[in-house]
Structures are given as C-alpha cells and as structure tokens.
Amino acid sequence: MDAIWQSGNFTVILESVLAALITYAIVTWIFREQAKNLPTGPKGWRATFDIIQAIRTSTKVRTMTYVTFGGLKILFINNSDLTRRLMTADDYKFIVANRTPNSPAKIAFVEGKDWVFTPYDAIMRKKRRMFHSVISVYGDGVEKFENIVSGEMNRLMAELEHYENKDFELYKFLARSLKNIVFILVLGERPDDVKKTDILEEFDIAFNKLWAPEYDFVLAMFPILAKIPGRFKDAVDRLKAAKIKAEELIYYAPKRSWTPGQPRGVADHVFDFHTKPGYEWLETDPDQAIGFLTSLFVAAHLTSRASLLGMFLCLINYPAVTKKIHEEIDRVVGERAPRLENKSNMPYTEAAILEILRLTTPIPFGGLRKASESIHIDGVVIPKDTLVLVNAGFFHHDEHVWEDPWTFKPERFLDKSGELLPADHPVRK
C-alpha cells in the first residue's frame, strides 16, 4: 500500500475515479429527463444512492412511483386497478407488452429467444400461439395431466412416510417433486435417474442467484464485471455451465429420439412445429426452441415452488385453518383421488389458496415490462423505455385495502353464506 502512495499511482487512480464520476454527473444532467408531469418519486442522485428508500417511498403513493436509478427508469405500479388498466386496456397493453431480458435471461435464453423475457414482436406472437396450442393438448385431456400429478403425489407421499415423526427439509422434497412433474410434461416420461432432476435443480439455483437484485442490477450497469474474476463472474460462469447441461436434457436428447407426429411431451410438440408453415425459424435457429423449453421450466417451477412453500408456511402457523381445509377435503373428496372437478365444491380451500397467494406474494415485483413509447395516463407521462414493475408486494398488504393485511384470513374471500366471492368482486380484483 505504501508503494502505491509513494509511486503516485494512487493519485492517478483517484483522479480517474473522480473524472468518471464528474463525467457521469455532467452526462446525466445534459440528458436528464425532459418530460414534464412525471409520476411522483425520487429521481437523480438521491434515488441512485438510496434505491431502497426510493422503494419505501413508493408505498406512500398508492397509484404509481417513478424512480431513476443508475440511468434506469423504473415505474412501480402500486395498486391493482392501475395494473389492470396498463396491462389490459387497449390504449396501453401493447405499449407495455415488451419484456427485455435481464442478466440471467441474456445468458440462459440467448438474448430474448425465450417466450418470457422478450420483445413483443412477430416471433413472440407465434411463440405464444405455439405455447397455447401445446398446452391445449393437456387442457383437452385434463385427465392425462391429473394422472401425471396424481402419480407423482403418490410417489412423494410414499417417500415422506419414511420421515414420520422426524425433522426433514420439506422444500427439497417439494422442489424435486415439482421438477419431476415438469420433466414428465416436457419430455413425456418419468426421469429414470435422480441426476436428471439434479441438472434442473442446478440450472434453477444458478438462474435465480443471478436474478437477485444485488447481481442483476449491478451487471446491468457494469456488464464488464461478468469478465473480471470475482463473485459476479463466478455467478455468470455457473449459469453458463448449468445451461449447457439443461439444454442437453431438455432439447438435444429428446430431439435425437423424436419421431415426427408421435409426440411424447411438450418438447416433441415443439419439434413438430418445425415443419409447419411460418415456423421454419425453429429449425434454422435452434436457440429459439431451446429458449422456449428452458424458460417454460423456469416459469413453471419458480412460481409453483414459491406458492407451495408459502402454503405450508401458512398451514403450519394456522392449524385452525388447516383443520377446516382437512374437513372440507374429507367431505367433498373422501377416500377418492382428488380431481380438478372437485374445486367448485370446495370454497374454503379455494379461499385459502387465494389468501396464501395474497399474504406470501411469491412475486412481489412482477410484470417486468418496458414501455415502447411514452404513456399519457391520469395526467402524468411515463417516459419511453421505462421499466414497469407491478408492486404486488405492497398492494397485497396495503392497510387501506385489507383489514389486518399481515394476518392469514381465508374468510376475506368468502361471502356471508361461505361461498367464494365472484372473480369480479372488488376484494378479488
């Protein structure tokens, strides 16, 4: 350290850092947001150096909050009504239809070649049609899907019986069971080796680690860190390695044994699309199909796992609710295997599921949309290229909307006769 001081290198480094900061300040000031009537919220240096406080400030404004952070323009939507308008109204829904890749998506899905983190273009629209077409195969044959889930649930319950009256890590068993279900849906067969689901587990862990704000936001502003030895490069390299194995499992292996017109699972249905007019790009650019299948796994597994863990968290801490659900299941299902058709006769269980999703909020900041042009709404202007985030974590616990928002109360979704409130009821909106 003394050598650095004496050589003058420290002075050079300090001057370089100061010059960079001054340059950033000047550029930020010159190209500062020119739009008028911006939504309320901290901006500029204040938000850049205190993003957490900026997020907390957003909870005081129950419509929307606009924040600038390190050159990023971010809008938090703080209530469900505004969320519904921006995402579904004809005037706005196509403007906010774009989803730009975040740091893990750029690596795992080759810069937007999936069907989640991608611009809303012609290819994306075809992918959505393909997704609905593939999933409808299971929608038309609900019994097939139910049998897949029931078979896996029977296997899981048999496995858990070995741990009766013992402590065990439930999330590991749930995670593996979910991966088995996704594996069967995508590939059409049960995994014959536990290491196959371990590959998906590693891909899931590596993807989610890079998705964490302390990695994603930093790499978005300083992508060079992905090439400099350290924790950021380690996280990037881990996802790249996991990606190679996941692609072999989900795409290349089933493609080698694929027989056209005889689909075993979702992957084979996607391969069959290669031969359909207008979908030739799936064959000429394999990354499109790879991104579709791997993002399907991430989307299906991430939210389902979080919801299941939230469910057990609530049921363990509220035994009275658990007892009521158990009684309803015994009354409606009895000794038979549960079926989807039973849902309509189980209002309390349905209400408990809605309350679990509200209380635990598996995705507190959802949406991840990007405005393709400036949006004029409610007297304010949301600038072009603003990242739009649905602040569900706030409005699911807003004391102005919910009585005792941090208390688990399935009854809030039931009417006086104990029936489930309709979907258009203000509480369910």
Image (cartoon, rainbow, N blue to C red):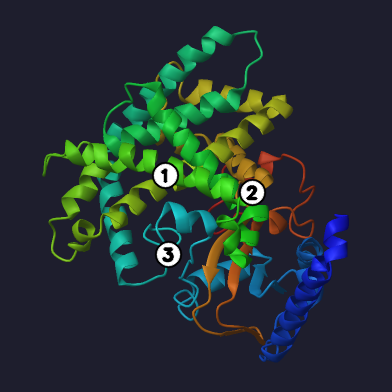
Mark 1, secondary structure of its residue: helix
Q: Report crowding for label 1: few under 14, some 14 to 19, many 20 or more residues within 10 A (C-alpha).
A: many
Q: Nearer the viewer, residue 271 or 226?
A: 226
What amino acid type is highlighted by mark number 1? Lys
For the point 34% across and 43% down, the residue is 247
**Residue 244 in view here:** yes
**Residue 429 in view here:** no
Q: Nearer the viewer, residue 137 or 184?
A: 184
The disc at residue 118 is 3
> From mark 1 to mark 3, how far is it between C-alphas?
18 Å
What amino acid type is highlighted by mark number 3? Thr
Q: Report crowding for label 2: few under 14, some 14 to 19, many 20 or more residues within 10 A (C-alpha).
A: few
Q: Nearer the viewer, residue 420 or 409?
A: 409
For the point 53% across and 60% down, the residue is 102
Quadrant containing the C terminus in the rendered view: bottom right
Residue 378 falls left or right of residue 60:
left
What amino acid type is highlighted by mark number 2? Gly
For the point 77% across and 69% down, the residue is 13
Q: Which residue is mark 1?
A: 243
Residue 410's spot in the image, x, y percent? 66, 40
Quadrant containing the N terminus in the rendered view: bottom right
Residue 351's spot in the image, x, y percent? 59, 41
Mark 2, secondary structure of its residue: loop
Q: Is residue 411 above or below residue 342?
A: below
Image quadrant in which you'd find residue 145 = top left
For the point 49% across and 79% down, the residue is 372
Asked if the residue under mark 2 is in contact with the one under mark 3, i.e. CB atoms within 8 Å, the reply is no
Label located before the other in sequence (2 or 1)? 2
Residue 423's spot in the image, x, y percent? 53, 54
